[in-house]
Amino acid sequence: MSTAADVESVASRRGSLAVEANSLCKDYKLGHSQTLHAVRDVSFSLYRGAVVALVGESGSGKSTVAKLLAGQEHLTSGSIRLDGELVDVRSRRSFRQYKSEVQMVFQDPFASLNPVHTVRHHLDRPVRLHQRTHSKAQVTAEVTELLERVHLTPPEQYLGKYPHELSGGQRQRVSFARALAARPTVLLADEPVSMLDVSIRLEMLGLLDELRRDFRLALLYITHDIASARYFADEVLVMYAGEIVERGPAEELTQQPAHPYTQLLVASAPDPDNLGGTLREGAKHTVRPGAGAATVGCPFNPRCPFADDHCLAEDPVLQRVSDTRAAACWHLDAAAASRPGVVTAGRESEV
Amino acid sequence: MTTGPVLDIRDLSIVYRTPGGDVRAVHEVNLALSPGEIVGLVGESGSGKSTLAYGACRLLRAPALITGGSVTYSGRRAAGPTDILQMRPEDLRRLRWREIAIVFQSAMNALNPVLNVRDQILDAISAHIRMPRQEALEKVSSLLDLVGIPSSRLRSYPHELSGGMRQRVMIAMALAADPEVVIMDEPTTALDVVVQRDILAQIIELKETLGFSILFITHDLSLLLELADRIAVMYAGQLMEVGAAKEIQHAPSHPYTMGLLNSFPSLHGPRRDLAGIPGSPPDLRREPSGCPFLPRCGYGTEACTSVDMKLAPVTESADPGHGTACPFVGPETHELVRQEVTGG
């Protein structure tokens, strides 16, 4: 049987390897010999100048993966390599080096900025800490440039402001600037736009894309919105119950999902071109909603229309679908046959 | 009884009194809800959409102040059309929940953490309807059955339920007194897409069997295009455009609506160029003259600073109720932009 090992990441076509996550596992002890497997055997790579999206519902473990990469959580097992070097969280000096290479942007710009500090303070500190610049003029020049990079212009106007004086979008721009202050090669963006208004989300994703290009960032974009991943990412990884269940090029994966869970995700997204079609028919999914993930066998089996004894007994590993795609399912053939139509082919540009 | 609207909001204005001056949260808004209809109210955070809905039920407290307008309710059980804004407190109490119920946004905060599901709903029933306990208990079971919660969950506390389940409990509670109007304030925003879809399908099914009307508040226009019969687009406390969902989607007449339509990536259909809307919403403390969208609008002219923001009918539209606040831009502009985008 062919496995995921021989599947190429489309992100690798953009640039050189930056971070390699190998079989990441994270367990949380819940007491009384109960263990929560938050992340199970997750492997992927980030490449310079490329966007990899991690898509999944809340509780699927996608944020935990980001925390593991950012060094905020310790690995239960597995390894992370940065530019080929094994990352050791326990070694303080090299870990600081790692931290300045790998930066994170958080979801909520209202919570991630300190309300009692000015914008200048938020940016000064990482510049001093990570770039080892101590001359006041140099720091100011650097901070000013950062603000210009995130389009907070004129910068002088923003330096003295406190977070509460800024709109949500402006705050998120400050968090982007703060992350860039360390001159990272890798940026982990955990739902960077989901707290923002719809009308400015696109602009922020555009900014993120611009920064990716200008700084040749290797970007991990974590989201629950698979539609934005389609537009923004090179490669999409779909997570369910701590495992990657499908991976592949963004457009292919969203238009021809292979895994039953990805199919469900895609079918659940609002589709204005199909006015109320599925909603009004009282679309009762073949899957049972609300059923939790299984602990034995395939985690999706309680909700999966194709589940059989094999799925109940054994958890499938990622299997090769094409040169660039893989999915973890025992019944990929059956799932492919049931795919709700060739969505793109027939439909003319309507919007 | 009548074919007129069950809820008719006219020229409603609401301000927030602050030391820095009045914040004009809702300004001269007209919106009607017909029996059995789903009206979607879409707007960004701070656009006044929740203030409008809560104001219409007089649920706002100081510093919010209703400065003008009327909200006429004419349900089947009501004696006749009455203005909610003029009602005596005891009539208001009778109206709330029995006639107009609300599904609040965050189900975790809206449910009482120390009451189990059964007592929670019993509480809502006993506060509004006189009913023997045994009957009330049966009502609770049938309500939960209606929203698809197994009876084994009757004794569960809110923290033991998933987000979707909690939202279903909220819906069951709202339906406890068989209301005519249900206001839903972002009922699915905190939920995953799969759960969101199940709940929306359920809401539609319930609406069809029980026959209530829905005022659905959300920031997600793509959701409304699929769900709502009519859509009202709100910006900076004012309505920008009102029309049938189909018209809003295919022949939007206001630049803000066009911008919103071009703001969300779609999963289905071909990839298209997205633009979003540059800039950010205005500060409502400063009384804007003319169109509040002007600073972000691509079609703005000198004339926009003195434009009358009353909704005017869109003559080209197939929907006679289609109105827009922008006299300068029409559906034909959208057509032009679309051609440019697809051609380029």
Image (cartoon, coloured by chain):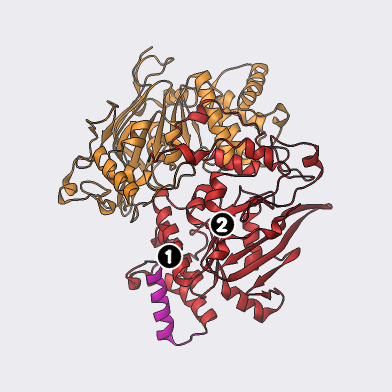
Chain colours: A red, B orange
User: Which marked residue is nearer to the observer: mark 2 or mark 1?
Assistant: 2
Of A43 and A282, the residue lying toward us? A43
* Residue B161 in sight: no
Q: Neighbour class for label 1 at 10 Å: few (<14), some, many (≥20)? A: some
Residue A190 % position (x, y): 56, 58
Chain label for disc 2: A
Say the numbered circle drawn on residue A210: 1
Q: Amino acid at mark 1?
A: Glu
Residue B107 % position (x, y): 57, 39
Residue B2 % position (x, y): 36, 13
Give the vertical position of B231 relative to A67 (above or below).
above
Of A172 and B16, the residue lying toward us? A172
Name the residue that disc number 2 marks: A235
Rendering quarter of residue A28:
bottom right
Q: Which residues make up the magenta segment? A: A132-150
Please check the rendered image and state whether residue A267 is part of the magenta-colored stretch, yes or no.
Answer: no
Secondary structure type for disc 2: strand
Secondary structure mainly formed by the magenta segment:
helix
